[in-house]
């Protein structure tokens, strides 16, 4: 924000690179495809990540999806 960014998605802890990619791709697609609310886009990407983890990895550990926060407009 100090550098002038209107919106920032930041990590709250060190995250797995693959999990970050899997979460950020749908987030960025949603944000760039429409004028969707960025907070809602992040929430939907997190929910998508939870569904994926539940279906393919038999767990929904928050480490993989809850480490991001959005601030700004």
Image (spheres, rainbow, N blue to C red):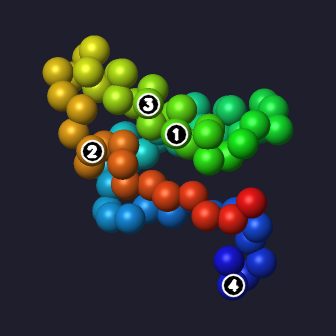
Tags 4 and 1 in contact by the CB under 8 Å rule?
Answer: no
Mark 2, residue position? 62
Mark 3, residue position? 47
- Return the residue nearer the eye: 25 or 41: 41
Q: Judge the density around disc 2: few (<14), some (14-19), many (≥20) Cα neighbours within 10 Å.
A: few
Residue 4 picture location, percent across and down? 77, 78
Question: Cα distance, mark 2 to mark 1?
Answer: 13 Å
Disc nearest the viewer among 3 and 4: 3
Q: What is the secondary structure assignment of the residue under circle 4?
A: loop
- Circle on res. 43: 1
The residue lying at 69 percent from left, 65 percent from top is: 72
Question: Cα distance, mark 2 to mark 4?
Answer: 29 Å
Residue 18 picture location, percent across and down? 37, 40
The residue lying at 72 percent from left, 82 percent from top is: 3
N-terminal of the pair, mark 3 or mark 4, is 4
Mark 4, residue position? 2
Q: What is the secondary structure assignment of the residue under circle 3?
A: helix
């Amino acid at each position: 924000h100090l550098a002038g960014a209107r919106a920032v998605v930041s990590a709250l802890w060190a995250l797995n690179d693959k999990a970050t990619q899997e979460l950020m791709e749908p987030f960025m697609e949603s944000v760039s495809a429409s004028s969707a609310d960025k907070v809602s886009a992040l929430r939907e990407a997190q929910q998508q990540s939870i569904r994926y983890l539940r279906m393919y990895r038999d767990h929904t550990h928050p480490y993989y999806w809850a480490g991001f926060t959005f601030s700004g407009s």
